[in-house]
Amino acid sequence: MSKQNRIIIIGGSACGPKAAARARRCDQHAMITMVEQGERLSVATCGLPYYVSGVIESRDELLQRHPDFFRDVLDIDVLTRTTATFINREAHTVELVSLDTNKTSIMEYDKLVLSTGSTPATPPLQGRDLKGIFTLTKIEDADAIRSVLAQRKSKKATIIGAGLIGQEMAETLVALGLEVTIIELFDRVLPALLDFEISAYLEKHLKANGVNLLLNQRVTGFNGDNDGWVNKVVMESGQVETNMVLLALGARPNTTLAQKCGLIIGPTRGIAVNEYLQTSDPDIYAGGDCIENMNLITKQKMLAALGSIANKHGRVIGSNVAGGRETFPGILGTAIAKVFEYNVARVGLNESQAREAGYDVVTSLVPGYEHATYYPHGKEILVKLIAEKSTGKLLGGQVIGPGETGKRVDVLVTALTFGATVDDLANLDLAYAPPFNNALDPLHNAANVIRNKLSGYARSLPPMEVHDKIQGEDKFTLLDVRSPDEWQETRIAATQAGLIPLRELRSRLNELDRAVEIVTLCHSSVRAYQAQRILDGAGFHDVKFMDGSIATWPYEISSTEAESAQGV
């Protein structure tokens, strides 16, 4: 009879339980032990904001699997309230300490799995130990926030960090009746994920829902009252009154155990692994938030603290510790969040990341609707695509709006995974019927805009460049080709702006100065692009349209009963 495979898995959140379950399914005779320092396994921590808000009523709904399931159904030994303190790689042993009895024990392994997760980033700010300052990574954190909100009747909340958790918790706290301020070090929300145009689109929505945004602000500490409760957030530029603070500054991989036993830590500060998710020790595997992943586009290493990725890691590891040779190819940085009525999603590289990686890029910024415009109750979405100029290869995409963004980003995930170009995307046979889609999906339109740019038919300027030209008082014509009613309702207030409706453009060409640059715009760029082509055909030599036009303009819009100027 062959020797039993002894598998120890350290960490019981997402990757660990998945690895344990998969290993058991692959090897019915292995001795599998799971070690978790908390009381619970398989906690759906991504649901914590919704538990705080009350959308998820009971904490039990976040517990995906009870320890008894692993013991009774999978025959896996579970040691909760137990921490691993040292790995002796030469002896193939792990030192464990019971948090209840403080008793130390030694366990032998043939294969070891590290799924030690991550820790919230908490810089050593002055006043950090005041009451009322929270992070949100565990059910206990959510319970503490719920308790404070119930008992202290807080009126003002401050979120430090405008990442995914910050966005989701802003919605939660506003729904609970609090005045919410988000403080962010960088110049936009979701700065690691979105480009300026998409962030600005989201920022307008946050402000419309009462969220106060303080961008480009560095927090230096906290002040408290006589009872030790936080009452002010101190920044380099001033102070914000508050009753509670949420630190949402991201997470750092838990690598202490790996470092103590000499495993290689990568440049991202996550545990280095190969395609089999083996560490630098072939008998030790690692997955989840504690490891670094390979970006499928740049081939560079990156961190990703997401339960979806951790579960994929767990399956690969579970197969391999049971004798398999499965590989994990890498990730695309896919993310999605619900922020009030908007759904914001992204995948791959944003424009800034693509340029930093050395790509010469071409982009499109296309507003649209989730389904046929003539079918009732359609909601808007905004798509940004990024592609390599020389090849048309897709590099990334962002989708935002109250409409259906999830299926669009999932299409982009699939396209990017298989190295698709904008030509491929433009011709995908996506499902169409009026309640579900347009005859051409917004992704098709966004791909076609890039194809038009690559072919030389389309030339554009992003809204930021147009804004800079207006502010710099550059001599150019900002030609609005919408209808007079649309012009009267909303328009960009600029001395360079004028109106010639598209239907009248061919007959009024003599009103335009051929010696200056012309930038056309409309509501969503469709008419603006048509106007550019008309002017090209009429011999104008310096014409562009504004990407996204009025629908994506992130700056001030005049909505007064404008002057009656009807020409340029």
Image (cartoon, rainbow, N blue to C red):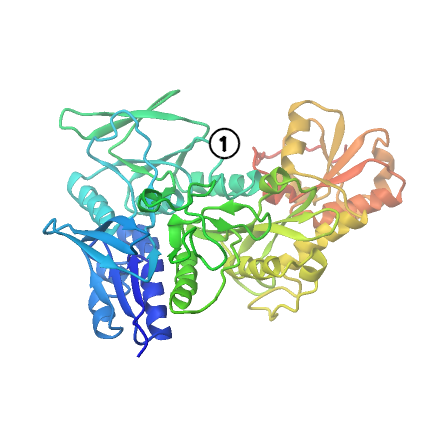
Q: Position of residue 283 (x, y in %)?
A: 38, 58
Q: Where is residue 510 in the image (x, y as percent from the top left)?
A: 87, 35
Left or right position of 155 against 375: left
Q: Where is residue 531 in the image (x, y as percent from the top left)?
A: 78, 45
Residue 142 lies, with reference to residue 212, above or below; the image says below
Residue situated in front as seen by the camera: 476 or 453: 453
Q: Where is residue 486 in the image (x, y as percent from the top left)?
A: 64, 44
Residue situated in front as seen by the camera: 100 or 157: 100
The residue shown at (65%, 53%) is 394
Left or right position of 106 against 290: left
Quarter residue 254 falls in: top left
Residue situated in front as seen by the camera: 535 or 296: 296
- Crowd tier of the residue under label 1, counting other residues whose Cα lies within 10 Å: few below 14, some 14–19, many 20 or above: some
The residue shown at (20%, 60%) is 79
Report the amino acid beneath label 1: Asp
The residue that mark 1 highlights is 187
Quarter placement of the C terminus: top right
Left or right position of 180 against 205: left
Quarter residue 567 falls in: top right
Would residue 303 be seen by someone viewing this image from the given angle?
yes
Quarter residue 15 falls in: bottom left
Would residue 58 be seen by someone viewing this image from the given angle?
no
Quarter placement of the N terminus: bottom left
Residue situated in front as seen by the camera: 272 or 126: 272
Q: Residue furthest top?
A: 237
- Give the structural element (helix, strand or loop) at label 1: loop
Number of numbered discs? 1
The residue shown at (43%, 38%) is 207
Left or right position of 217 against 512: left
Q: Which residue lies furthest to the left in this view?
A: 101
